[in-house]
Amino acid sequence: MTLGEHITVLRKKKGFSQSELGKIVGTSGDIIGRYERDEVKPSIEVVIKIADALEVSADFMIGKTSLEIDKSTLKRLEELSKLPEEAKKQVFLVVDALIRDFKAKQAYT
């Protein structure tokens, strides 16, 4: 997916018009439309503003990752990264168990 396609899909998912997104990032709806059609490429600063407005990472916007991480998840990951190593291991054990249980439940339904 191109940058423009990502912007279009995420903007519509958020329920923003091109004009509304343009106002949030400090440009016009016409320019957002040009970004969406891949006629022009925004600067990295504008990509970051658009990503912030759409509540995704810049990496996701530019296609570097397919993992769409919202702001609340990202905040949790940042908090997790600040924990001591032993605490991280404990959190990951719990998360791994929950994921395993969820997958098992899905397999049997």
Image (tube, grey):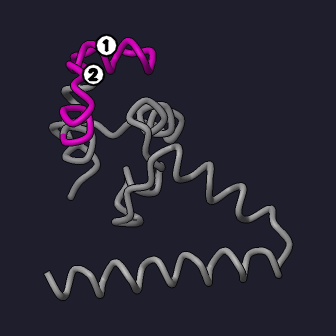
The relative height of residue 83 versus residue 52 in the rendered view (above or below) is: below
Q: Give SS at disc 1.
A: loop
Q: Amino acid at mark 2?
A: Ile
Q: Which residues are magenta?
A: 9-31
Q: CA distance from mark 2 to mark 1?
A: 5 Å
* Nearer the observer, 66 or 41: 66
Image quadrant containing the N terminus? bottom left
Q: At 38% from the left edge and 64% from the top edge, which residue is drawn?
A: 67
Q: How many marks?
A: 2
| Image quadrant in which you'd find residue 79 | bottom right
Q: Amino acid at mark 1?
A: Ser
Q: Is residue 37 magenta?
A: no
The relative height of residue 73 versus residue 71 in the rendered view (above or below) is: below
Left or right position of 27 against 45 = left
Q: Position of residue 9 (x, y in %)?
A: 19, 42
Q: At 79% from the left edge and 75% from the top edge, which residue is drawn?
A: 87
Left or right position of 34 against 42 = left
Category of crowding for the residue at label 1, using alpha-carbon neighbours closer than 10 angstroms: few (below 14), some (14–19), many (at least 20): some
Q: Which residue is mark 2?
A: 31
Disc 2 vs disc 1: Cβ atoms closer than 8 Å? yes
Q: Which residue is mark 1?
A: 28
The relative height of residue 88 versus residue 31 in the rendered view (above or below) is: below
Q: Is residue 24 magenta?
A: yes
Q: Position of residue 22 (x, y in %)?
A: 34, 17
Q: Position of residue 24 (x, y in %)?
A: 42, 17
Q: At 38% from the left edge and 15% from the top edge, which residue is drawn?
A: 27
Q: Give SS at disc 2.
A: helix
